[in-house]
Amino acid sequence: DFGSQLGAFAPNRKFEASASGEAAERAGGPTLARLVRELKQRHGVRYVYAWHALHGYWRGVAASLGAAEGLEVQQVFARPSAHLQRVEPQVRWDAMTLFGTGLLLSRPQLDAFFARLHAPLAAAGVDGVKVDVQSGLASLGGGVGGGPSLAARYVGALEASVATTFGPHLIHCMCHSTENLYRYTHGSLLRASDDFYPSRPASHTMHIVNVGYNSLLLGELGVPDWDMFTSLNEAASLHAAARAISGGPVYVSDAPGQHDVALLRKLVLPDGATLRAAAAGRPTRDCLFADVTSDGVSALKLWNYNGNHNGECNGECNGAGTARLPPNAVVGAFNVQGARWDFETHGPVAAAQPPQPVSALVRPHDADCLRPHGGRFAVWSHLGSRLEVLPSGSAAAQVTLQHREWEVLTIAPVLAQGRVEWAPLGLVEMINAGGAVVATTLTRAPADDHDAEARLTSRAAGRFLAYCTPRPASVWREGGELGLPFSYDDATGLLAMQIDEATASKPAELLVHW
C-alpha cells in the first residue's frame, strides 16, 4: 500500500493475532517467531530476511507512532526534479508528493527508530533485512538539510543498527542515487535493477541488459544483486544463465511446488551453495557502446572469472617447474534484441518486428583477467557441449543465437609442462562450470615413471571435464587406493570423470598422471 505509513513496530495481523507475540505464542496462535522457526526447522531455510523501507514504510512513519514512542516525526513533501518527473511522471501525483512522508531528522532519533524497528524482528529469529525505497529519500531533502545530508543520516543509522542487530545480513534495494550509494560502509549487497516482472514479456531482455551495464558502476562499490526470478517463467533459462555469471546471489521467488528442478540444479549444488563467480559480471569491451537491444546485429556479452586473480601467471613453468592456473573465465552471450525502454510509455516495449538471430564472436580476451596471459585456451560451450582449443586470446569461438537464446562459455588457459597440456574446465552440468575449480597445478612428476602430474581441487561432486594431451596414464583421488575411472577422446583431448562425495568442507583432491 503505497499510501500507508508505519503504524507500529510489532508484527501486524498477517503474522500475529491481536495479542502480543509472547501471549500468542503461549496460546498456540500464529506468531512471526513461530513462522520463522517453522521455516528453519521444518523446511531447512538457513536465513530469513524481512523487508522494510529505509524510512519505515512507503510514506514513512505515522505521526501516531511517533507520539506513542516519543519520536519527533515531521511530515515532509517530496520535490521531485524535472529529470525524475520525465523518467517517472507518476511522482507528480504519488502519495509521497500529495500527502507527505513522515521522517525523523536527527541522528539520535534515527538511531532510536532503527533500534525499535529491528528489535522485534531479531527477537522472532529474523536474520537480516532487505531495505527498499532508498533513492526516493533524496527528493525529500528540501528544507531539512538537503537530499545528500538526509540520506547520510538515514543510511548511517540504518547500517549501524544492522551491524549491531544482524551483522552482515543487509541487502540495499532501489538505491541507485549517489546520495545513497556513496554512503555505504557496512552493507555491500546492492540491487542492480528494477524488479523482475514475470508477466511482462518485453521486460526480460531489458532486465539482463540493465543489470549488466549497471554493474559497471555498482561492481566498484559493492556486490551487485541481479534480483530474483521464477524458474518456470517463459524466460527462466535466460535469467538463470545471467544469474550464474553475475557474481552475486542466486535466488528464486517460485511458489511452493512450482519449480523447474532441472534448471535449478544447473545453478545450485546439492548442499545449497552456488558456484559464484569472483567479481561482478560486466559487459565485454566490444559491447560497451553497442546497442544490444535495437541494432539488430549485436549480442550482449557478459564476462566474469573464477578463482583468485593477480594477473601474474602466463601459464608457463616457473623456476620450480610448476605452472599455476590463472583464473578461468566465463563469458555469456545473449540475444537481447527486440525490446527497449520507451520514455513515452515509461516502460519496456517490444519491437514491431520479431528480432532476427545474431552471431557473436567470443574471445578469451573478452575477459579482462585473461588479457595478460599468452598461449592457448580451452573453451567449453555449456549448451553446445562442445570443446574448442583456441591458439591465442584473440582467436574466437562463434555462437549464433535466436531471440532470447544464450550460451555460456567457460575459458581456461592451457598449462604446459613439456609435452603435456592441461586445462580443467569444471563441473559441466553447472552453467558456471569453472566455479568448481578451486585450485590446480601442473608439475614435473616427482617419480621417474611419470612425465608430469596435475593436481586438482574440485569444489563439489559431479561430472568433471578437462582438456589435456596426451591421454593420461591414470587419475587418482587423493588418499584413495584405487584409480578413478575416466574417459578420454583422442580427437579433442577431452578428459571426463565422475567425482563423488565432495562438499565445501571436504572438496575432492585429484591427481592426474602422464
Image (spheres, rainbow, N blue to C red):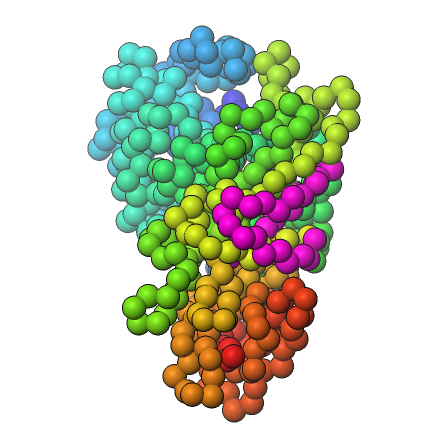
Which of 189 and 506 lies nearest the eye of the viewer? 506
Above or below 173: residue 145: above
Q: Is residue 108 left or right of residue 222?
A: left
Which residue ends up furthest to the left in the rendered image?
A: 108
Which residue does the image show at 45% across and 77% down from the upper left? 452
**Left or right, 251 with reference to 248:** right
Q: In which quarter of the image is residue 134?
A: top left
Q: Which residue is at the far top?
A: 82
Q: In which quarter of the image is the N terminus?
A: top right
The residue at the point 64 percent across, 14 percent down is: 345
**Please, is residue 443 above or below residue 304 in the view?**
below
Residue furthest front in the image: 419
Q: How far across and how far down the image is residue 178, in percent? A: 35, 26
Image position, residue 496 (x, y; %)? 63, 71
* Picture residue at 30% right of the left edge, 72% below the top: 320
Q: Which residue is drawn at 62% across and 34% down?
A: 299
Residue 392: percent from left, percent from top: 51, 50
230 in the magenta segment: no
Camera-side residue: 120 or 352?
352
Observer able to see residue 99? no
Question: Which stretch is magenta?
Answer: 384-412
Is 385 one of the magenta-colored residues? yes
